[in-house]
Image (spheres, rainbow, N blue to C red):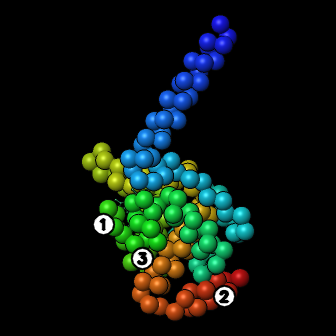
Amino acid sequence: MIQTKHLRCLSVVMAGVLAVATTAALAHGNVVPQPVETEGLKPLPEGQWLTENPYRGNKTAIEIGDSGFNENCARCHGLQAISGGIAPDLRELGPEYDEYFIGHVRNGVHRNGMTYMPAFEGVLSQEAMWAIRSYIDKRYYEYNDKNLDDLYKQADEQS
Ligand code: HEC
């Protein structure tokens, strides 16, 4: 009896795994949001949202943001943030767009009952969001042929 019960449980779990796997395959990538490890970054106050990137030019943040972007954003915004047309090209977002950026990432984009972009608040930490922003800063610099040393210098001045 107990064995049958176990088996039934297992098959429910397997069905779940299959469902997730199938959805992921259809969407060409990771659909389940991936947590981003932000060790090495200055912790930010919980529940207090900044409107400016506290890690701009910080190389550790850029590196963390690079993989965080790949796992959570690239499937819509393109590898290396080069848009394939599904979603806007984020390399156009200069530093004046920090507040705009964090608003979009926290809340996602929903219109007429449709979700164009999922909300990441509660999924990614604020640290992870700004790390991804730092990576996009770098892509903005590269896209606009700006000198990356000028970006890295901003981190030195902060610390
Ligand atoms: C399911 C697809 C999808 C995912 C995943 C996604 N986005 Fe988006 N994002 C969109 C779409 C579509 C828009 C444009 C929405 C609209 O119509 O305004 C957008 C808009 C944005 C904007 C505003 C851009 C602009 O030029 O107006 C930002 C910033 C942004 N996304 C950042 C991110 C980041 C960072 C991630 C990962 C943490 C992410 N998005 C994940 C689909 C996605």
Label number found at residue 85: 1
Q: Residue furthest left?
A: 112
Badge 3 crowding class, 10 Å Cα cut-off, few under 14, some 14 to 19, many 20 or more, is: many
Badge 2 crowding class, 10 Å Cα cut-off, few under 14, some 14 to 19, many 20 or more, is: few
Label number found at residue 157: 2
Q: Residue at x 64, y 18 (%)?
A: 6
Kindly identify the amino acid type of the residue bearing the numbered disc 2.
Glu
Q: Residue at x 66, y 13 (%)?
A: 3
Residue 9: image quadrant is top right
Badge 1 crowding class, 10 Å Cα cut-off, few under 14, some 14 to 19, many 20 or more, is: few
Out of 52 and 94, give the one closest to the viewer. Answer: 94
Kindly identify the amino acid type of the residue bearing the numbered disc 3.
Arg
Find the distance from the CA under tag 2 to the CA under tag 1. 37 Å
Kindly identify the amino acid type of the residue bearing the numbered disc 1.
Gly
Q: Is mark 3 within 8 Å of ligand 1?
A: no
Q: Do the numbered discs 2 and 3 sit on residues whose CB atoms are within 8 Å?
A: no
